[in-house]
């Protein structure tokens, strides 16, 4: 979020920040749909630790650029009090065409997310990994929930970002594709019909990204605290590693019903880590925290093999009632329910 340093409202200043990005970060600070939003992206990194170090440098860079211009930068799933009606669209053909096509749906997309790419070799392996991650998407959302406020109101949800983005087409829980042949055929069908220009207009919560050679997990709310981002990246990498090993072992994947995974996702958006999620294997509801601890235990060897066991342990804070949404709500209550003080706290936590 790009903020006015005094009012703490969103500021339409992406172009000023882009113009000041040093050459060493060229192409890593990018515009998004609205002029009050910026995106930072690491280069491909060998491991999670290096990705975290690069993210830290990028956060410091954009924070410094902003402060030199009377602006601030903060990270969260939503701005607690901003209104989408006050935002301007970035002057880029892709975004202008998107707004022309979707109108109100695109205009209200004042939300902030995190995307984690993991390199996967081979098209069928990529589909297998994406299909495998698909069933865990609600749990990943519960861990990352960081948007309890919208338009100045406490929403009663831990991730209000989720229902806002839900209005877009081709979002949410993806189909279980099974093979690259099926996936590519269905993408081609949509392209022939004129629904999309290419596969990058399919904004599923997890998707293969052939141009980059990755599987991209997109379900996460943006994290205020950098350590939480690093922990979620470690979990995603370890989960992809496990699915890749199962692919090598020719373990068949059971296709879980989309409606059940989607029901879990709504539960996660509402309750975050306090939600009860359906365990497909046991056929009963279990606490999200119990499910998360079980998954982290299962992935311990994968994290060790990838060299990110320490980074995975950063999620322990999220399991102890310290998700972004829970932290926001507690800080807001302690400070007289003043959202401007909350935004100021977000700025400090983002830079640190």
Image (spheres, grey):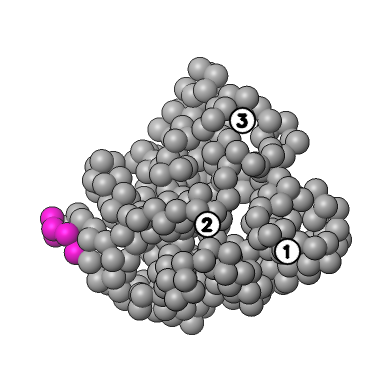
Q: Examine the rendering and report whether any part of residue 47 can be seen.
A: no
Sequence-first tag of 3 and 2: 2
Residue situated furthest left in the rendering: 283
Q: Nearer the viewer, residue 177 or 136?
A: 136
Query: What's the mark number on residue 248?
Result: none
- Expressed as whole percent of the image width and height from the top left, the position of residue 28 reads 73, 57
Position of residue 259 relative to residue 81, above or below, is: above
Residue appearing at x 76%, y 61% in the figure = 71
Extent of the magenta region: 282-286
Position of residue 146 relative to residue 170, above or below, is: below
Measured in 3D between alpha carbons, the distance from the residue under mark 1 to the one under mark 2, in whole angstroms, is 16 Å
Position of residue 97 relative to residue 280, above or below, is: above
Q: Examine the rendering and report whether any part of residue 148 can be seen.
A: yes
Residue appearing at x 54%, y 49% in the figure = 111
- Residue 205 as seen in the image, left or right of residue 50: left
Sequence-first tag of 3 and 1: 1
Find disc 3 in the rendering and name its residue. Answer: 98
Find disc 2 in the rendering and name its residue. Answer: 80
- Expressed as whole percent of the image width and height from the top left, the position of residue 64 reads 78, 69
- Sort mark 1 into few (<14), some (14-19) or many (20+) by Cα contacts within 10 Å: some
Q: Nearer the viewer, residue 270 or 55?
A: 270
Q: Do tag 1 and tag 2 residues touch (Cβ < 8 Å)?
A: no
* Quadrant of image for the N terminus: bottom right
- Residue 32 as seen in the image, left or right of residue 217: right
* Quadrant of image for the C terminus: bottom right
């Amino acid at each position: 979020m790009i903020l006015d340093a005094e009012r703490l409202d969103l500021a339409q200043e992406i172009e000023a920040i882009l113009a000041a990005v040093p050459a060493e970060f060229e192409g890593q600070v990018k515009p998004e749909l609205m002029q009050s939003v910026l995106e930072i992206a690491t280069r491909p990194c060998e491991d999670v630790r290096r990705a975290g170090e690069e993210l830290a440098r990028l956060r410091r860079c954009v924070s410094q650029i902003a402060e030199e211009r009377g602006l601030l930068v903060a990270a969260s799933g939503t701005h607690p009090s901003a209104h989408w009606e006050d935002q301007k669209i970035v002057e880029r053909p892709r975004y202008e065409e998107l707004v022309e096509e979707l109108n109100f749906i695109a205009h209200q997309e004042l939300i902030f997310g995190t995307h984690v790419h993991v390199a996967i070799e081979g098209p069928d392996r990529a589909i297998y990994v994406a299909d495998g991650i698909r069933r865990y998407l609600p749990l990943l959302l519960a861990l990352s929930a960081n948007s309890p406020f919208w338009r100045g109101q406490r929403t009663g949800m831990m991730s209000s970002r989720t229902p806002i983005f839900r209005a877009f087409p081709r979002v949410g829980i993806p189909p279980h594709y099974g093979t690259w042949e099926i996936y590519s055929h269905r993408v081609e069908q949509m392209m022939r019909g004129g629904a999309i220009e290419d596969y990058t207009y399919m904004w599923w919560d997890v998707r293969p990204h052939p141009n980059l050679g990755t599987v991209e997990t997109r379900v996460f709310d943006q994290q205020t605290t950098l350590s939480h981002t690093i922990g979620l990246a470690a979990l995603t990498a370890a989960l992809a590693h496990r699915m890749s090993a199962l692919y090598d072992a020719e373990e068949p994947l059971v296709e879980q019903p989309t409606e059940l995974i989607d029901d879990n996702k709504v539960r996660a958006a509402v309750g975050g880590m306090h939600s009860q999620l359906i365990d497909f294997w046991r056929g009963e509801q279990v606490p999200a925290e119990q499910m998360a601890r079980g998954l982290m235990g299962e992935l311990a060897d994968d994290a060790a093999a990838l060299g990110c066991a320490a980074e995975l342990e950063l999620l322990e804070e999220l399991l102890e009632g310290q998700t972004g949404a829970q932290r926001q709500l507690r800080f807001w209550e302690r400070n007289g329910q003043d959202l401007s003080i909350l935004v100021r706290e977000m700025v400090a936590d983002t830079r640190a």
